[in-house]
Image (spheres, rainbow, N blue to C red):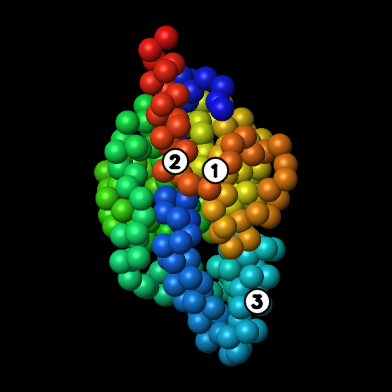
Amino acid sequence: MFASLKAIDSWIFDLDNTLYPVSCGIHALMDDRIRGFVARLLKLSDGEAHRVQKDYFRSHGTTLNGLMADYGIDPHDYLADVHDFPLERLDRAPPLAGKISVLPGRKIIFTNADAPYARRVLARLGLSGLFEEIVDIHSFGYRPKPAEAAYRTLLEKTSLNPGTAIFFEDQARNLAPAKALGMTTVWIENGSDLGDLQSDGAHIDHRSPCLAAFLDRVIETLALENAE
């Protein structure tokens, strides 16, 4: 399944729909908040707002980036609004703390969301304190994954070596820049909305429908390698 994992010293994780499965329903809550924001801002029906929302996601990486480009909205106001929903549904997520804690090396969150929301999610998942840094949308100047600037910011803030890093992400297109930098890439192929865009390229090293199950195989492989 793997080439040697002994060289991996940095474990990079996307947040939404990666650290928890789509079945938790968090994306649906966020999607509703985003659509509502777009509808109020542009005075559109729900259907029209949904179309604008997804068009921006395809063309700009996030709806936020599209709205900033065309309407100059305040990103802090937007992010506070669209992340204002309860997180109880995350209780359905499989436990990850024990799996992530035993991975050797650094653990980093790399997300198009913002750090306050990421910390709420990590706390709800029981993952607080496991990640040394959250590289978020504010830190890379609202130029979201898969924009090259986001990955440059990740490297600048963490000083990690991409050749010894592995990146887990539910949006296939966001793995292409990581692979170009030399990272090992894992697509969490779990049915995320538009997650299969650009999913047919060599920029994907591994695929799995479930992060928890994939990490189990990683841990087993590491144990075998360390026993040799």
The residue tagged 1 is 208
| Image coords of residue 185 (percent x, y) | 58, 37
Q: Helix or strand or loop: what does disc 1 sit on?
A: strand
Q: Which of 27 and 174 is in front in this view?
A: 27
Q: In this view, does 7 lie above or below 145?
A: above
Above or below 81: residue 94: above
Name which residue lies at 69% across and 63% down.
Answer: 59
Work out which quarter of the rendered image holds the N terminus and state it: top right
Q: Position of residue 70 (x, y in %)?
A: 65, 74
Where residue 114 appears, x then y in whole percent?
A: 42, 59
Q: Quadrant of residue 65?
A: bottom right
Is the residue marked by circle 3 packed among few (<14), some (14-19), or many (20+) residues within 10 Å? some
| Callout 2 crowding tier (Cα within 10 Å): few <14, some 14–19, many ≥20 | few
- Residue at which label 2 appears: 213
Q: Which of marks 3 and 2 is nearer the N terminus?
A: 3
**Label 1: few (<14), some (14–19) or many (≥20) C-alpha neighbours in 10 Å:** some
Q: Residue at x 58, y 41 (%)?
A: 207
| Closer to the eye: label 3 or 2 | 2
Q: Residue at x 54, y 30 (%)?
A: 162
Q: What residue type is labelled 2?
A: Ala
What residue occupies the far top of the structure in this picture? 228
The spot of residue 186 in percent (x, y) is 56, 39
Kind of residue sitting beneath label 3: Val
- Proximity of marks 1 and 3: CB atoms separated by less than 8 Å: no
Q: 172 or 63, which is in the foreground?
A: 172
- Pointer 3: what residue? 52
Q: Is residue 73 visible to us here?
A: yes
